[in-house]
Amino acid sequence: MVLSSPHSYGLKYMSLGVLVLQTTSLVLTMRYSRTLKEDGPRYLASSAVVSTEVLKILVCTLLVFKESNFSPRLLKEEIVNKPVETMKLAIPAGIYTLQNNLLYVALSNLDAATYQVTYQLKILTTALFSVSMLGKRLGFYQWLSLLVLMAGVTLVQWPTESEGDSEQKILTAGSQFVGLMAVLMACVSSGFAGVYFEKILKETKQSVWVRNIQLGLFGSVFGFLGMMVYDGQRVSESGMFQGYNTITCTVVVLQALGGLVIAVVIKYADNILKGFATSLSIILSTVISYFLLEDFNPTSVFFLGAMLVIAATFLYSKESKPASGSAVKV
């Protein structure tokens, strides 16, 4: 069905709004939840990762049931009767689980604006893995955009003189270094897992919802094992859901539904629109971090770096074309 022009534009701008809202709200609520001071223990990031995967499985299962007229036969055929195909998802699922844990570490140590800008390095890692694993060719503007992107992120992370005693400076620098390392590792894992997942999707004709169920099954297992290894004692003392509150549940829901929302709107959102969404999300995160969270003091160097990253996002989109059946997993 060909959409009328006004209707098409309406859907595009609605997609833009949804993408901006989802991206910005997830980053800000996750940052707020990791810095909120309250009585009692803080929720475990490893527990939130497991909860996210379980919720994602439930939502995708409902979507598969709806597509197959509520018959469980499709799930049995695609997951149970094809163990080799299912096992292929173990690698990206494990990497996505690591990535999701790293994002909590990053936002526990970096303000939302710095995180948002730095995390755009996933464009670089995805591009490099696409070239090496999928044999894609990048155009001149895309290679140029990657250089601009690296320059922008470097400026954003450039150390600045801050007020306060030397001990506080050391603690702040140490925290920023941990956050930076977590973001960089998340960018590498995101790039590799995304391209690997895209390769699997192109080799088979399975529903993207079925693939997300497979990812979720492995992700929940890996996440649970990681939780027991690193937080097993705290889980045994206070339970898996210790410290959960409304904000925590909001973070879990936003992260679980994020990729599914993108999957729904991506058919209406081209790369230029996604560039707008990224840019608006960075700007909103900067404004809200400064005025509401009060954990961010922007400098001229940061603004210059952020502008370069935003410009690189648009420049990279100039020659890229959305691939059909591209990987939808965040």
Image: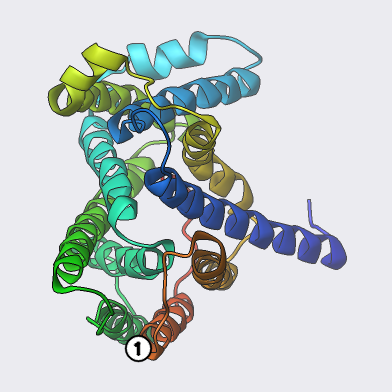
Q: Position of residue 294 (x, y in %)?
A: 48, 65
In the picture shown, does residue 214 fall above or below 204? Answer: above
Left or right relative to 7: residue 201: left
Identify the residue at horizontal 58%, vertical 20% (top origin): 62
In the picture shown, does residue 37 fall above or below 301? Answer: above
Q: Position of residue 240 (x, y in %)?
A: 33, 18
Residue type, numbered disc 1: Val
In the picture shown, does residue 285 fall above or below 325? Answer: below
Q: Position of residue 308 (x, y in %)?
A: 40, 86
Relative to the observer, which residue lies in front, 299 or 206? 299
Instruction: Choose top left, top right, bottom left or bottom right for residue 250.
Output: top right
Identify the residue at horizontal 40%, vertical 25% (top origin): 51
Relative to the observer, which residue lies in front, 180 or 265? 180
Mark 1 crowdedness (10 Å alpha carbons): few <14, some 14-19, many ≥20: some
Identify the residue at horizontal 35%, vertical 48% (top origin): 198
Colouring style: rainbow
In this rendering, does residue 99 appear at all? yes
Instruction: Choose top left, top right, bottom left or bottom right for residue 104.
Output: top left
- Can you identify the residue that label 1 sits on? 301
In the picture shown, does residue 195 fall above or below 132? Answer: above
Relative to the observer, which residue lies in front, 90 or 151? 151
Identify the residue at horizontal 23%, vertical 53% (top origin): 192
